[in-house]
Amino acid sequence: NHKIDLRGMTKKEADEILQEFLDKALVANVSSLRIIHGKGDGVLRKTVSAKLKEYPDIRLWEHEPDEAGGDGVTIIHF
């Protein structure tokens, strides 16, 4: 299961950990990832979205259905 939980982290911590997570996933040729960032005030969701835009290998990202975490979880497809 390829997932990471960023809840409770600062924007800077989340950005650094997410970059390392994405880089390792690319090297491992993973097809999809699950990022749990929570809902809160949206800071981590925006941090995740900004980081994903830096990766041209990511072809799609979307939020889970409401019953599975809604916009507190982002699914990435390479």
Image (cartoon, rainbow, N blue to C red):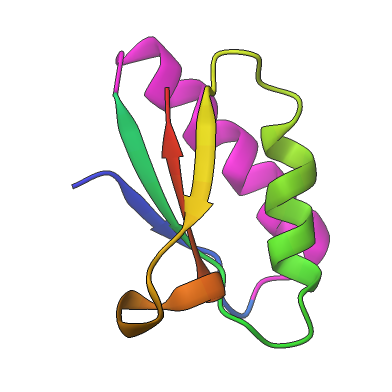
Q: Is residue 5 magenta?
A: no
| 46 sits left or right of 26 in the view | right
Question: In the figure, 25 relative to 61: above or below?
Answer: above
Residue 5, compared with residue 15, is above or below; it is below
Residue 35 in the image: above or below residue 60: below
Q: Residue at x 63, y 35 (%)?
A: 19
Magenta stretch holds residue 28: yes
Residue at 80% x, 63% y is 11
Residue found 54% across the figure and 23% down from its top: 58
Q: Position of residue 40 (x, y in %)?
A: 69, 88
Give 7 or 43, whichever is nearer the viewer.
43
Q: Main secondary structure of the magenta part?
A: helix
Q: Name which quarter of the figure residue 26 lies in.
A: top left
The structure residue drawn at horizontal position 51% and vertical position 50%, both measured from the top left corner, is: 62
Residue range corresponding to the magenta coloring:
9-30
Number of residue marks? 0
Which one is nearer the viewer's eye here, 55 or 15?
A: 55
Q: Where is residue 53 in the image (x, y as percent from the top left)?
A: 74, 31
Please determine whether, in this image, residue 7 is positioned above or below residue 45. below
